[in-house]
């Protein structure tokens, strides 16, 4: 049952990622700037009292880190879901980790390829590498959780 749930979650999350990637450059940029404004309101006292140009400059300054953090986060989630879909206590952990990493990283590569056809967007190898780092984080978290859960489950038997 766990596998079926994680397969469904994996597919849903892939659709979510695809939807974000299908946004043209203007829509994607607006999302990042909106998040930049929200962060500005949190970390800068009286951010809303700053001139609009300074608010925009702040949002632009943190745009790149926001986008890359989003890449890592969305692919960490995907790595975790894929790990949940394939985890088996009967298979060596590093083989499972490699399979999960490969599946999610191939999806990242296909997503970057897809972005090449979206107006104003580009597919970049460095983004696949960043996505792949996120996958590693998600896979490791998944391994730790599932291995610990099944170890405790077997101890109670």
Image (tube, grey):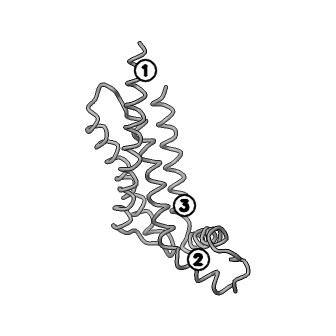
Q: Nearer the viewer, residue 69 or 82?
A: 69
Q: Secondary structure at mark 2?
A: helix
Q: Nearer the viewer, residue 149 or 89?
A: 149
Image marks 3 and 1: residues in contact by CB distance under 8 Å: no
Q: Residue at x 31, y 41 (%)?
A: 97
- Which one is earlier in the sequence, the residue at label 2 or at label 1? 2
Circle nearer the viewer, 2 or 3: 2
User: Which residue is painted at 55% across and 70% down in the image?
Assistant: 24
Q: In whole angstroms, how far apart are the C-alphas of marks 2 and 3?
A: 19 Å
Name the residue carrying label 3.
20
Q: Disc 1 designates what residue?
A: 153
Q: Earlier in the sequence, mark 2 or mark 3?
A: 3
- Give the spatial CA distance, label 2 vs label 1: 47 Å
Front label number (3 vs 1):
1
Identify the mark nearer the N-term, 3 or 1. Answer: 3
User: As displayed, is residue 116 above or below residue 98?
Assistant: below
Determine which of the numbered discs, if any, sits on residue 59 in the image. 2
Query: Where residue 20 appears, x then y in whole percent?
Result: 54, 60
Which picture quadrant has residue 114? bottom left
């Amino acid at each position: 049952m766990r596998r079926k749930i994680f397969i469904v979650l994996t597919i849903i999350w892939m659709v979510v990622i695809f939807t974000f990637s299908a946004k043209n450059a203007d829509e994607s940029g607006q999302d990042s700037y909106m998040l930049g404004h929200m962060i500005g309101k949190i970390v800068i006292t009286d951010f809303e009292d700053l001139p609009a140009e300074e608010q925009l400059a702040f949002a632009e300054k943190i745009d790149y880190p926001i986008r890359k953090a989003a890449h890592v986060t969305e692919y960490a989630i995907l790595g975790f879901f894929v790990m949940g879909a394939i985890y088996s206590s009967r298979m060596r952990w590093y083989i499972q980790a490699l399979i999960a990493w490969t599946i999610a990283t191939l999806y990242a590569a296909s997503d970057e390829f897809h972005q090449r056809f979206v107006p104003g967007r580009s597919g970049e190898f460095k983004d696949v590498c960043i996505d792949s780092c996120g996958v590693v984080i998600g896979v490791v978290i998944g391994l730790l959780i599932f291995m610990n859960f099944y170890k405790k489950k077997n101890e109670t038997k």
